Image: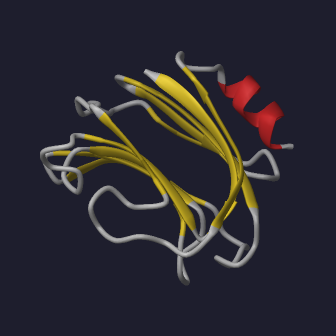
Amino acid sequence: SGSLLGNSNRAAVTFADFAAPASNRVLFYNANAAPAAAIVSLAGVTQAIAGSSGASSADFVKAAAGYKTNDFAYSRKDGELTIDTQITLPKVDALCLGNKGGMGYLNGHIKRLTYYPKRLSNAQLQALTL
């Protein structure tokens, strides 16, 4: 379980299984034409996905996500909150900055990155992104 706050453009932060980073990961990214998003995958199956609309990959996006088994939430710069209560977390043993867990590097910038070793409340995630 944990929480992550980031402010980035065209960047990615991934907690991954070093042996299978594209299949088992907790991914936060803002890339190419896609809006900022958070994805949890286990054995290649998406467990949770949340995205932000209304921002291009060139924009800096402030977003936060909290995760633990059956408790996932994602908040973006305007406090919009997406939750999922049916997820299984992968076991992860690597932190990848600037790449999508074995799926290529991104040409972007990270202004701020803060990791919290616990699942912050939804209200805390929203307050961090306002």
Vertical position of residue 54 compared to residue 83: above or below: below
Q: Residue placed at 66% from the left, 69% from the top?
A: 53
Report the front residue among 85 and 88: 88
Vertical position of residue 89 compared to residue 22: above or below: above
Q: Residue placed at 63% from the left, 62% from the top?
A: 52
* Quadrant placement of the C terminus: top right
Report the front residue among 56 and 79: 56
Answer left or right for 126 relative to 18: right
- Percent of width and height locating residue 24: 22, 44
Report the front residue among 80 and 23: 23
Vertical position of residue 124 compared to residue 74: above or below: above
- Percent of width and height locating residue 73: 55, 36
- Percent of width and height locating residue 118: 54, 16
- Percent of width and height locating residue 47: 30, 44
Report the front residue among 39 and 98: 98
> Can you tell which quarter of the image residue 44 is in?
bottom left
Q: Residue placed at 23% from the left, 29% from the top?
A: 91
Answer left or right for 20 relative to 78: left
